Image: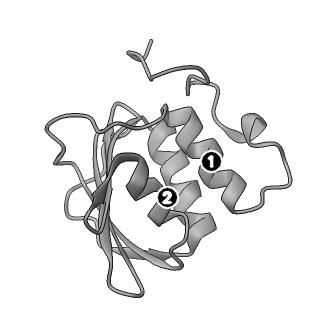
Amino acid sequence: MVLPSSKPAYELDFERLVEELLRQVQAPFTGTLFISSDDGEKGRVGFERGHILGLSWGSTQGEAALDRLRVAGRFRVTPSVHVVFSTPHSLPSTFDILRGLMARRGASVPPSEEVPSGVRPAGRDSEPD
C-alpha cells in the first residue's frame, strides 16, 4: 500500500502513533512520515518496504532520536511517498523499535505478541520475503 503524497496531516497521541507505525510496517509502506509534536519539535520516520530505515527527532538521529520520541506527547503526522533518508541510520531492528515503543505505552499484552509476524525479531532487518 502506498499512501498518496497529498494525504492531509492528522493528529495522534503516542499510542495511536505507535499503531500508525505498525500499520506502515504491515502495509508495507515505502516513504516518510513527517511528525511534529505539540511543543513544536519535528521529526521523521523513513520506511522502505515496511522496514524502518531512518528516524530523526529534532537535531538527533538514530537511537538518540528514538529515545527523544518516547517522551513526546501528542503528534501531527503527514505521510509522504518520498523517502528522505539517503542512508539508513544506526537503529535497532524494526521489531525492536516497535517493541520498545509499545513497552513505553504500557501495553498489557507482551509486545512480542503484538508485533506483526512479518517483522523480524532478531538482529538487523533483512530483505522482506
Residue 55 position, x and y percent, is: 34, 50
Can you give x and y, in whole percent of width and height, for residue 15 in the image?
A: 63, 65
Residue 122 versus residue 127: which sits nearer the camera?
A: 122
User: Mark 1 packing: few (<14 Cα in 10 Å), some, or many (20+)?
Assistant: some
Residue 125 point in image, percent of width and height: 44, 23
Residue 65 placement (x, y as % from top left): 39, 57
Q: Nearer the viewer, mark 1 or mark 2?
A: 2
Side (left or right) of 21 relative to 90: right
For label 1, the residue is: 100
Label 1, secondary structure: give it.
Answer: helix
In this view, which residue lies farthest toward the top? 129
Q: Where 27 falls versus 75 (above or below)?
A: above
**Residue under the image location 51 percent in, 56 percent down:** 20
Residue beneath the point at 55% across and 71% down: 71
Residue type at tag 1: Gly
Q: Above or below — where is 98 with respect to 20?
A: above
- Quarter holding the C terminus? top left
Q: What number is the disc on residue 78?
A: none
Whether residue 102 is situated above or below residue 92 in the rendered picture: below
Tag 2's secondary structure?
helix
Horizontal relation, residue 19 to residue 61: left or right: right
**Of the pair 4 and 15, the residue shown nearer to us:** 15
Quadrant the N terminus occupies: top left
Q: How far apart are marks 1 and 2 (CA)?
A: 10 Å
Residue 35 picture quarter: bottom left
At 29% from the left and 39% from the top, the residue drawn is: 89
Pick the front one: 26 or 97: 97
Confirm or deny contact between disc 1 and disc 2 (CB under 8 A): no
Check disc 2 and report the residue beneath it: 67
Q: What amino acid is found at the position of numbered circle 2 in the picture? A: Asp
The outermost residue toward the right is 108
Q: Quadrant of residue 8?
A: bottom left
